[in-house]
Image (cartoon, rainbow, N blue to C red):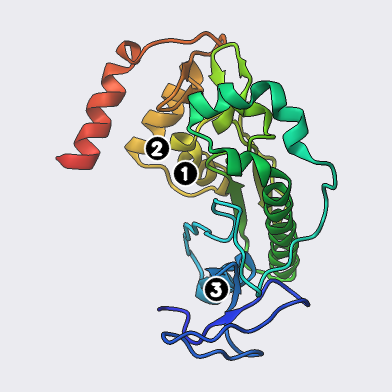
Amino acid sequence: EDFGNTVITNGENATAKLSSENVISFGDGPRYVRGLISDQTSFERVIEESETNSFIFNVTIQNHGGYDYKGDDFVSTEYVTKDIRKDWTGQRTMNSIMYGVADSDVENETAKVNQYLTCANLSDQAFKDLIEELEKSDQKTVVLMFGDHQPGLLVSEHYVDVYEGIDLDYTVPYVLWANYDIEFDAPEYTSSNYLSAILKKNAGIGLTEWDQFRLDMMEDYPVVTGNIILDKDGNCVSMDFLKDYEIVQYMRMFD
């Protein structure tokens, strides 16, 4: 509701779809992809909302699964032409049992992969536009972008591979960027619970005791997730090692 009039489009090949709830307004309304607010519109809103000393946490929705949208307002690019289901003949039953995947999901996997890649490409373009806009600004700005998990696609290797106990389903890259000279101090491997402290530290924003607590803990336990905890030597450890963290986290959430 915050974005006003609705435009549903994913680029040049788009068809307006009338809705009883929304007024189609091509040209001056927000852009939607598969009926979801596009990353482009989301990032434009970030620029509009930004002021001196702003801290904006922007969660995007454009690429959320599933990837079997059938609307006339979305046109997938055919990045993949091979029939992916043929590669899964021997593992079809296993994955149906392990992940509750229906046969129809396997049959349509090529189309789903193309839909996901089309959405990801739109995100790349939108992020490029955001960075180019910030490059022109005199306001010192740091951007941190990350994903919360890999796409739910059978072709993704994370569905069949578990590397040394790490669920690759949740192994995703992150990027730090600034529009001014800065020497980033950030670990190659980390987890989302540390990201805000990492960002504040690199942006030169004053750290709270909670921030410093996490940064200190990160030196010994650089990855702490609901699925796995790794110590600084890359060993899997149990939550029992992190009682202090559990107590402080509980205090911040409920006390």
Q: Are marks 2 and 1 in contact (CB under 8 Å)?
A: yes
**Disc 1: which residue:** 196
Q: Residue at x 22, y 26 (%)?
A: 247
Q: Quadrant of residue 119?
A: bottom right
Secondary element under disc 3, as helix, strand or loop, is: helix
Instruction: Determine the secondary structure under disc 1.
Output: helix
Front disc: 1 or 3: 3
Which residue is denoted by mark 3 in the rendering?
45
Q: Is residue 176 left or right of residue 22?
A: right
Residue 120: image location, x then y, percent: 70, 54
The spot of residue 114 in percent (x, y) is 74, 52
Q: Which quadrant would the N terminus be assigned to in this image?
A: bottom left
Task: Please name the amino acid that badge 3 sits on.
Answer: Arg
Q: Residues within 10 Å of mark 1 (few under 14, many from 20)?
A: some
- Which residue is outermost to the left? 255
Is any part of residue 223 visible from this angle? yes
**Residue 41 percent coordinates (x, y):** 60, 73
Which amino acid lies under the numbered mark 1 shown in the image of this protein? Ser
Going by the image, does 34 lie left or right of 116? Answer: left
Quadrant of the rendered structure where residue 75 is? bottom right
Spatial CA distance of label 2 from label 3 is: 28 Å
Q: Which mark is residue 211?
A: 2
Q: Secondary structure at mark 2?
A: helix
**Between residues 198 and 168, which one lies in front from this camera angle?**
168
How many other residues sit within 10 Å of disc 2, few (<14), some (14-19) or many (≥20)? Answer: some
Instruction: From the image, state whether disc 2 or disc 1 is nearer to you.
Output: 1
| Residue 155 sits in quarter | top right
Q: Residue 80 location in percent, x, y?
A: 82, 47
**Residue under the image location 41 percent in, 85 percent down:** 21
